[in-house]
Structure formats: C-alpha cells, structure tokens
Amino acid sequence: MFFTKEQNKFLILATEASTFLMPKNYELIEHTADIGIKVKGNDLAGLFKNAALALFDIIAERQPGKNTLLKTIPLSQAADDLEELFIDWLNELLSLSATEELIFTDVHIDALDERSLRARAVGEEDKYFTLKVEMKAATYHGLKIEKTGSGWEASFIIDV
C-alpha cells in the first residue's frame, strides 16, 4: 500500500534524518570476492533489523533532495533453526526489493523467536536511490550468530 507524500511528510523526513544521523550498527568484513558483514543488536529483534538495514545501506544511497512514497510490506518466516531463519529473512528482503523495485529503509519486527518471524519492511521506490552494488543472496558460508554479553552478533557473507 502506497501513501502520498503529504500523508507521510513526517515519516519521510524521519527516514531521511535516520539515514544520515544514525550510527551504523554493522561493519564490513574482509572477503576476497563477496561482501562480508558483521552486525550487532541489543536483542534478537535488533540483530535482524540491523542486518536488514545494513544490506540496503550497502546496496544503495538516497539521492539528495529526493522524497519518495513509502510502501510497507508484511512478512512472515518460519524455519527449523535460527541460522535458517536469519538467511531466509535476508534473502526474502533481497527478493522483495528486486520484484517490488524498493529499497528498504526501515523494518519493524512484530514477533520473533529462534524459529519464526513476523515483521513489516518499509520500502521506498528505488528510482530515488543510486545503486552502489547488486547483491544476489545471503549465504550460509561464514555464518555465525551468537549471543554476547551486550546482546547479539552475526557475521555473514553476501554473494554479489
């Protein structure tokens, strides 16, 4: 469902501000051919959200002065374990981004445990972004998800 720019004036401005003011909750990991990402979250929901936002921060950059309509897409995932859920989540977002021609700029995790997820991804039309890299898929290669003293941490590789 798309909303008009007037209806989402506050959301658009908030999204623009968050893109430029929020600290990055990820770092790139050295990898020979693909992209390695290490992401952190205070809790499991934060980890999943930050992993999603990291992907799209790496994929594209908003063109200055360009406002766009927002589209919210509900998602649900089920998996046999946390690792499968994490990879399926990222790959579903990459797939939806390509088919819906959106860049996801926010994610709301509504329910999450180690085998299931319900969330809403908020996307903006990709024509208002400069694409920096095309990502094919999140892979199990190098995947590591662990609970730490300060929350959760994941390292993973994206096939480009």
Image (spheres, rainbow, N blue to C red):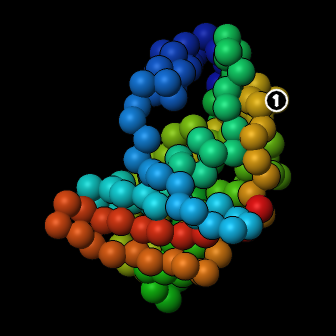
Looking at the picture, how far across and down is residue 127, in whole percent? 82, 29
Q: Secondary structure at mark 1?
A: helix
Label 1 packing within 10 angstroms: few (<14), some (14-19), many (20+): some
Determine the residue located farthest toward the left in the rendered image.
149
Q: Residue visible at 24% across and 62% down?
A: 151
Looking at the image, how many numbered discs can be counted on the residues? 1
Which of the two residues, 134 or 76, is positioned nearer the viewer here? 134
Residue 15 x %, y %? 51, 26
Front-most of 113 and 148?
Answer: 148
The residue at 57%/38% (across/down) is 105
Q: Can residue 158 be seen in this snapshot?
A: no
> Which residue, given by chain and number where applicable, does mark 1 sit on?
127
* Point 49% across, 24% down: residue: 20
Kind of residue sitting beneath label 1: Lys
Quadrant of the snapshot with the N terminus: top right
Residue at the (78%, 38%) spot, across then down: 131
Q: Find residue 28 and report its horizontal and vertical position in percent.
A: 53, 55
Q: Is residue 131 visible?
A: yes
The quarter holding residue 23 reads top left
Which quarter of the rendering shows the C terminus? bottom right
The quadrant in which residue 81 appears is: bottom left
In the image, residue 77 above or below residue 120: below
Residue 53 at x, y = what percent? Answer: 53, 47
**Considering only vertical position in the picture, is 131 above or below 147?**
above
- Residue 26 horizontal side relative to residue 12, left or right: left
Q: Is residue 54 above or below residue 67?
A: below
